[in-house]
Amino acid sequence: MKPAAQDSNFSIPSTMRAWVLDDPGQLRLTEKPVPQPGPAEVLIRIDAVAFCDGDIRIITRGPPALIQGGLPFNKNFTPGHEYMGTVVKLGAGVDEFEIGERVAVEVHFGCGRCERCRAGMYTSCINYGMNYGEHNKGHRANGFTTDGGFAEYAVNNVNTLVHVPDDIGDEEATLIVTAGTAMYALDTLGGLIAGQTVVVTGPGAIGLMGVAVAKALGANPVILTGTRDTRLNLGRRLGADHLININTENPVEAVKRVTKGKGAHYVLECSGNPNGLNDGMDMVMRGGKICLIGFANEPVPVDLGKLVRNHISVFGIRGEGKSATHRAAALVAMKRFEPKIIHTHTFKMEDLPTAFKYSRDRIDNAIKVVVKIRDN
């Protein structure tokens, strides 16, 4: 079969269908001009996009989106950030990708000039959101500060793209970024050493990818906690060695039992539970490390004395910095785990508001809900 990268016969229209965010919770299908790639950019024909909890927060509340310095409502803004597609046009100087090549995308392209970007922490760019008017310093976070993937086309810098092998389906490719977030969490903790214990709290999409990536990197045992047996069992298929349903078992006691009283080396807190950090401190061994990926909706009390007494390190991450998505994509390409296990529902582009409801309300046990922008 002829490789897709050799096919350059793409007809690019002048306008495209795109969903925009009006009032909170209100998405509207409209027409927008097809964006044009600048230097070091490509135009992507979006083939599929997945819903993330971040999208739900943006659509219903606004933050963490930041459009023209403020809330994203009624600004003709298109959300959506976990998308994949096909390169259909190259900007000036692009030779890293070819027309027709399938790619998945990272969310963030930092300004490249601030201290954080120079250290590879572009998801924490000091100039976050500075991409408009006189405040334009080059930062982009598609679906957060600039138009995202709930549309037929998007422009991305080449630094945000990862190759998608031909044997990886569109739906599966949308989950590479999710796996990249889990990889970034483990990177931030200092890098996983094979044979060390990892606890993942919360079997949502990122938590389940946390299980998969940790196991692929040699963690042993991997312990997954949650409230739904159906999701916990998916974790088993992705590599979890022990499952703990916190409705029927005390998670701290269970972790101590599995680790013979020592506690875990690492905890990935993916649930956003207000007591997640306090539980994590009781799960790790002295000198252990905790990474917060999920976040609560309100301030929570924390026993800081326990952190100090037990030399526990706590980290927070945003997104998938330091090219973690590229490393996650390599694991997917090597079939070290199957992201498609957590893909539960697919909708057409015109049914995107229904997809949003399924994802938000977890209808029919929805985990990763994917919207196919193209029918074939």
Image: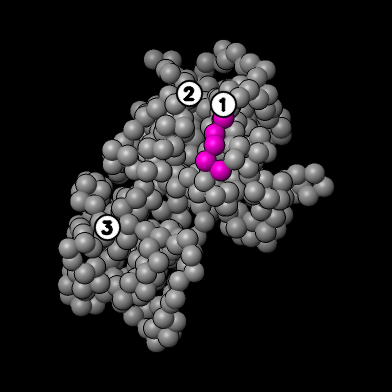
Dot 3 lies on which element? strand
How far is mark 2 from mark 3, CA to CA? Answer: 33 Å
Estimate the x, y position of residue 208 in percent, counting from the top left: 32, 50
- Amino acid identity at mark 3: Gly
Residue under label 1, please give it.
Answer: 29
Residue under label 2, please give it.
Answer: 350
Which quadrant holds residue 153?
top right
Q: Earlier in the sequence, mark 1 or mark 2?
A: 1
344 lies left or right of 118? left
Q: Is residue 67 above or below residue 306?
A: above
Q: Which mark is residue 226?
A: 3
Residue 170 at least partly seen: no
- Amino acid identity at mark 1: Leu
Q: Is 27 a magenta residue?
A: yes
Estimate the x, y position of residue 147 in percent, counting from the top left: 62, 37
Q: What is the basis of the colouring in this image?
A: one colour
How far is mark 1 from mark 2, CA to CA? Answer: 8 Å
